[in-house]
């Protein structure tokens, strides 16, 4: 579950990590160079992309601890800081559809949150579901 790899945004930003995703899509928006990405998370998002046959837009992937702390309402234990989470939306599909499919894929583990702006998905070991 926690197979996390560290990439350099500067040196490997355009590197393909699945058929449809590249390292830069998971990078922290503060411009920091290391990008932590869980391979199971990337594969889960790839599965979602293929299932819906539409672009998956990652709003937030990896976050540095300092950037995460600057976000109002963010958890001090955010899965984003470990490279285990992504906030996203899928072109042409409701957030509820994406939420439902992610819950189906993750089964008895992982976190899935439904929000007005999209869906939070993470690959934590335990199961957590919520609507924000």
Image: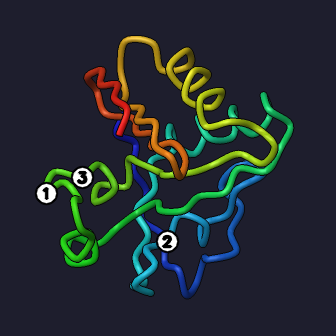
All told, the count of numbered labels is 3
Q: Quadrant of the C terminus?
A: top left
- Disc 1 to disc 3, C-alpha distance: 6 Å
- Disc 3 to disc 2, C-alpha distance: 15 Å
At a point 45% along the width and 13% down the height, the residue shown is: 107
Residue 104 appears left or right of 30? right
- Foreground pick, 87 / 123: 87
Q: Earlier in the sequence, mark 2 or mark 1?
A: 2
At a point 50% along the width and 37% down the height, the residue shown is: 40
- Disc 2 to disc 1, C-alpha distance: 19 Å
Q: Whole-percent x and y of residue 84? A: 38, 47
Q: Whole-percent x and y of residue 71? A: 27, 70
Depth check, mark 2 against mark 1: the one in front is 1
The residue to which callout 1 is attached is 76
**Mark sitting on residue 27:** 2
The residue to which callout 3 is attached is 78
């Amino acid at each position: 579950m926690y197979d996390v790899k560290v990439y350099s945004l500067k040196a490997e930003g355009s590197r393909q990590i699945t058929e449809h995703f590249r390292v830069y899509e998971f990078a922290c928006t503060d411009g920091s160079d290391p990008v932590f990405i869980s391979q199971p998370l990337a594969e889960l998002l790839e599965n979602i992309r293929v299932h819906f046959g539409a672009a998956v837009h990652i709003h937030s992937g990896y976050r540095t601890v300092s950037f995460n702390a600057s976000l109002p309402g963010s958890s001090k234990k955010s899965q984003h800081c470990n490279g285990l989470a992504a906030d996203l939306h899928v072109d042409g599909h409701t957030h509820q559809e994406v939420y439902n499919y992610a819950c189906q894929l993750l089964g008895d583990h992982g976190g899935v949150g439904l929000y007005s702006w999209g869906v939070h998905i993470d690959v934590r070991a335990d199961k957590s579901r919520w609507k924000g």
